[in-house]
Structures are given as structure tokens and as C-alpha cells.
Image: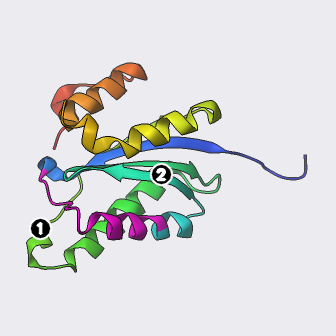
Amino acid sequence: MSQSLAKILVHIIFSTKQRVPLISNTIRPKLYSYITGILENWDCDLIQTGGTKDHIHLLCVLSKNHAPCKILEQVKKNSSKWIKTLGSEFSKFQWQSGYGIFSVSQSNILLTKKYIEDQEKHHKKMTFQEEFKRFLEKYQVSYDERYIWD
């Protein structure tokens, strides 16, 4: 085959450091737009964004040319720097150190989009930590709870 073809669909989840609720409804659309630009610069197509005041969900097609860890490093680093420029209330903004990244099948795109769109509704019933642990269990990811929260 003369060309390399791939479609790597993923659901990415990460929170603010210590789950500090800094992602207000007023900055959220701007943040999503900024992250979209970062992902485009890394040859990724963002399908859906969502979240709450303390965390974010991204459904995207990852680039086949860049490592996921490098893409996420750039998304978190650059968006954190950008948020700090929005005012003194964001001067200490940080993302958590880690993240969750989970594969999504083509047949589950609509379901995943809906899940991400409904974040506000989900989090009336559960915390970010409960949600994240459910993902780890669903995807059978081994973890030590001492090291997943910062």
C-alpha cells in the first residue's frame, strides 16, 4: 500500500488541578474554540467538546503522525497559558497532571457525542471522580487511586 491510512477516534477526559471550578460558562466556549485550534495545528479533528466547571471531555480523531501524549501535552500546556491571560482570577489556573484517553468505535460516535453534550446533566448526579472511575472500570484500566487525583 502506498499510503498510510488511519482513523483513531478517542474520548479524552481531564480536569482542572484539584478540580477547582474555574471553567465558567462565560469562558467555556472560548476555551473549546482555543482547544479546537490547538488540535487542528496537530492534525486532529475535534468532533465534540463538553464539560463542567472543573473538567473537560473531547471526542476527536487523533493524528496518525503524532503521539497522543504529545498532543495532550500541547493542548493542556497551551490552553492553560491562554486561560491565564483572561484575567487575574485565572492566574493560578492549571490542568491536572494526567488524563484519560479511551478508544471509541465508529458505531459509538453519536452515543459518545450525546454523552459529552449532556455533561451538566450527568454531574447533577455524580462527581467528576465518580465519572472518571466509571470510565476506568468500563475500559478495564488498572489504576491506583492514590495516583489518579492531583
Relative vertical location of residue 28 with respect to residue 125 in this rendering, above or below: below
As rendered, which of 52 and 146 lies closer to the eye?
A: 52
Question: Residue 69: horizontal and vertical position, in percent?
Answer: 45, 50
Q: Which mark is residue 92?
A: 1
- Tag 1, which secondary structure? loop
Asked if residue 48 lies left or right of residue 78, the reply is right
Could you tell me the amino acid type at mark 2? Gln
Q: Let me know if residue 32 appears in the view.
A: yes
Q: Residue at x 21, y 60 (%)?
A: 23
Q: Which residues are magenta?
A: 20-36
Depth check, mark 1 against mark 2: the one in front is 2
The answer to which image quadrant residue 24 occupies is bottom left
Q: Position of residue 42 (x, y in %)?
A: 55, 64
Residue 21 highlighted magenta (yes or no): yes
- Mark 2 sits on what residue? 48
User: Can residue 103 be spotted in the picture?
Assistant: no
Q: Amino acid at mark 1?
A: Lys
Task: Check disc 2 and report its element: helix, strand or loop.
Answer: strand
